[in-house]
Amino acid sequence: MAARDKLWIVLLTCLVLAQIVVSLLVPQGAPLTIVSDLIQGTLLLMATAAFVPNSFRSRTPVRRSRGFWILMSLGMLFWLTYQGMWNYFEVLKRQDVPNPFLGDIVLFLHLVPMMAALALLPHLGEDDRDARLRTLDLALLLIWWVFLYVYAVIPWQTVNINELVYSNNFNATYLTEKLVLLLALVTLTYQSQGGWRYFYANLLGASALYASSSYVANYAIAHQTYYSGSIYDIPLMFSMAWLALLGKFAARFQISEPRPSQPFLGIWITRLGMIALFSLPWFALYAQVEQNCPTAVRDFRSTLSLLAMIVMGTLVFLRQKLLGNELGSLLERSRRSFENLKTLQSQLIQSEKLASLGQLVGGAAHEINNPLTAMLGYSDLLSSSALPPSEQAFAERIAAQVRRTRTLVASLLTFVRQSPARLSGIDVNSVVQTALRLLTPQFEAQAVAVQVELGHAIPSVLADSNQLLHVCLHLAGQISNQPQERSVLRVRTWQEGDSVMTEFSRIAVPAESPFHPLQDTHAAKAASLSLGACCRIVQEHGGRILAQSGEGGYLAFRLELPVATKSASQPSFSVRPSHAGAGS
């Protein structure tokens, strides 16, 4: 323990011991009153000084915890102000405190911020929405407590002065306030855990000691046995010293970590706010039917009830508006979540279909390979036999078509197995030419002419040749399948910065819209399910597919792949990072 903390404890102990000594040894009179008031003022000053530093961000980084300590410090400050007003009369002016006493308002109000601090539930974690609603609930409760004091006490202090009724009503409302505070502390002590439970338990003990000592002091006042500095003030001094120690060493209780929110406490705070609002008409009705009540007091209470209903009703309207906005936002999020769930369900179903189709294609490809192998063997035998040149040419064509079919089957197997790509330096022009040769029968059947513009000295790209061929076949096939009359398929390749560009488009129908990145989620809806797989393949190669759309279902694709670099020290290829941004 630091020397400063030890000095703090010693000073508090000395003050309490001094109060005990003077209460037991000094007779009733001005010296006892002055010493006792100064000791109480010093204890409250130390307690307030102990609570205020806990409001700083360095000690309580959580916002609601800072709000808790700010409200607690405000309550202690009100209590210190009340003691200062009391000392003004008894110490400085050397006269009894008047009754009714204006400082009683401050004494009553000093517990209101403390109850608001407890209603913040600083030991629980809440989101911003809960914090906003809790603030409105706290405002309702604070206004109601102020209304209760003004309704019950102020009329007999200002409208129709009556010391006896004033004292009885003040003691009743103040006792009610202290009982509510104790009940709240009992509930929080039971609901909380860890350091917060230890803190609430100590605060409950200090508050219970203060409430009981105040009740005993009021009893002594009623029987005319109380005077300032009497033995009735000793428990009050202990409660003040307890609060000073609690505020000083609260940071050691490990209360900075809030626990998950508990709906039970938040619901009851909201219900208390609604009960406070619904009680206002009953207060107004009671003011009208109360017998033996002066007319001025009756009118004052009725008007006060009406004004309180207007103010608290406005807060309830704001609260309901906030809840309405939150409900609308929640419904919109639920609608989007439901739509996303339906989309995900359809995607899962489609994925299952594709998986089944992949298994079917894999099995069929293996079965196709067997007759293809036989056909290739027989065609090779025919080519090596003593056939006329014309027949040997036919045999060679059969062998070429069989090899082409085997290549396509191998590509299908590679795609279905989703095996890791074997990356190597690939010439894009060669892949494009191979794809166009394989698609030649399709182009002839669709009466599509092909215009090829291959760039010169285009660097290699790091890719898997089979997968890249699959992508080129599919993109070119998508363009040729567009429902248009006689047109020309244009295929271009060129280098643009650190990327190799390959474009598949039709020149019969120009499009003015720019190219934009094609994402997997939109690709399947834009053309076919295989286009989504192409996007995935290209992304795995560090590139992307750009799309351009126009009137009449016009569609063009641009394949962008990063250039493969080969350093002198490393024989393996690497891929330059492709630049983001839409193509034009």
Image (cartoon, rainbow, N blue to C red):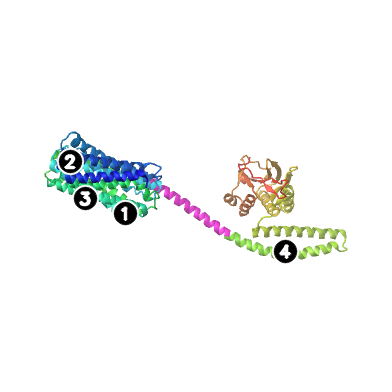
Badges 2 and 3: C-beta atoms under 8 Å apart? no
Q: Upstream in the sequence, badge 1 or badge 3?
A: 1
Examine the rendering and report whether any part of residue 184 can be seen.
no
Give residue 79's position: percent from left, percent from top. Answer: 25, 41
Give the amino acid type for the residue marked by disc 2 in the picture: Leu
Quadrant hosting residue 306: top left
Q: Secondary structure at mark 3?
A: helix
Q: CA distance from mark 3 to mark 4?
A: 97 Å
Q: Upstream in the sequence, badge 3 or badge 4?
A: 3
451 vs 239, left or right, is right
| Relative height, residue 397 to residue 47 (above, below) | below
Give the amino acid type for the residue marked by disc 4 in the picture: Asn
Give residue 114's position: percent from left, percent from top. Answer: 29, 45
Which one is closest to the eye, mark 4 or mark 1? 1
Give residue 405's position: percent from left, percent from top. Answer: 73, 59
Give residue 113's position: percent from left, percent from top. Answer: 29, 43
Tell me the residue that label 3 is attached to: 212
Q: CA distance from mark 4 to mark 1?
A: 78 Å
Q: Upstream in the sequence, badge 4 or badge 2?
A: 2
Q: CA distance from mark 1 to mark 2?
A: 38 Å
Which residues are the magenta region? Answer: 324-351
